[in-house]
Image (cartoon, rainbow, N blue to C red):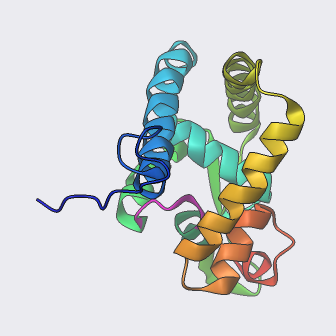
Amino acid sequence: MTAFPADPTAAEEFPLGARAYLFYLVFQIGQQRQAALEADLAPLGLNFAKWRSLMFIERLGRCSMKTLARLSGVHRTTLTRSIDRMVEEGLVRRSSLPSDRRRVMLSLTSAGKAAFEAAHGVQEQFTEHVLQDIPDKTQRDLCRRLSLVLKGMIPEPDLAEDILAFDARSPELARG
């Protein structure tokens, strides 16, 4: 097992040194958030994976499986199975582009939009509870700093920008 190098300036403050501890915290934040939302979404008949797909499709308006996989960081095979179930449940619609019938686009049905709205309310309550004692200015500063970390992790600058923009304005996302 590889030992983490000691960070003498942070040795007293962080158990792994600041650099390693940063990623440990980001991992734990994601894991704890997912577990909490799984429990909170269950009464709505949703799980975290469905909520995540609903969120991305709602935010993008419509998108291809390729774009959804690329932005959500979920392997396309796993995502296809999840989307298949969501289509069967009437939450997501698949449609072809008139210009290219081979290209399948995803969008939310009215039931999918309703499910997203309900889930969004649950997620907002969770977020409000967790961040209530962290000032807005600090939250914005964290977003700026974590954006720099994310940019440093993604070798494709366009992908990093698309992920950070999280909307359909990007030319890559518009193409699907």
Q: Position of residue 162 (x, y in %)?
A: 72, 72
In the picture as drawn, the residue positioned furthest to the top comes out as 43
Q: Residue 125: which quarter of the image? A: top right
Q: Is residue 51 left or right of residue 171?
A: left
Residue at the spot 66% in from the left edge and 85% down from the top edge = 157
Tell me which secondary structure the magenta stretch mostly adopts: loop
- Which is more toward the observer, 5 or 36? 5
Q: Residue at the spot x=61%, y=66% of the render?
A: 150
The region drawn magenta spans 71-75
Q: Is residue 129 above or below residue 99?
A: above
Q: Position of residue 83 (x, y in %)?
A: 49, 51
Residue 39, given in percent of the width and then of the height, sits at 47, 17
In which quadrant of the rendered view does residue 146 lie?
bottom right
Regarding residue 36, the answer to whether it shows in the image is: yes
Instruction: Please state the total of marks drawn on the protein image.
Output: 0
**Which residue appears farthest toward the front when viewing the image?**
8
Identify which residue, 124 or 68, lies in the foreground: 124
Which residue is most to the left?
A: 1
Which quarter of the figure is the N terminus placed in? bottom left
Residue at (75, 36) in percent of width and height = 113
Residue 43 located left or right of residue 114: left
75 lies above or below 21: below
Residue at image location 59% in from the left, 63% down from the top:
68
Give coordinates of residue 52: x percent, y percent: 58, 44
Residue 84 visible in the shown view: no
Up the image or down, 95 lies above or below 120; here it is below
- Magenta stretch contains residue 30: no
Which corner quadrant holds the C terminus? bottom right
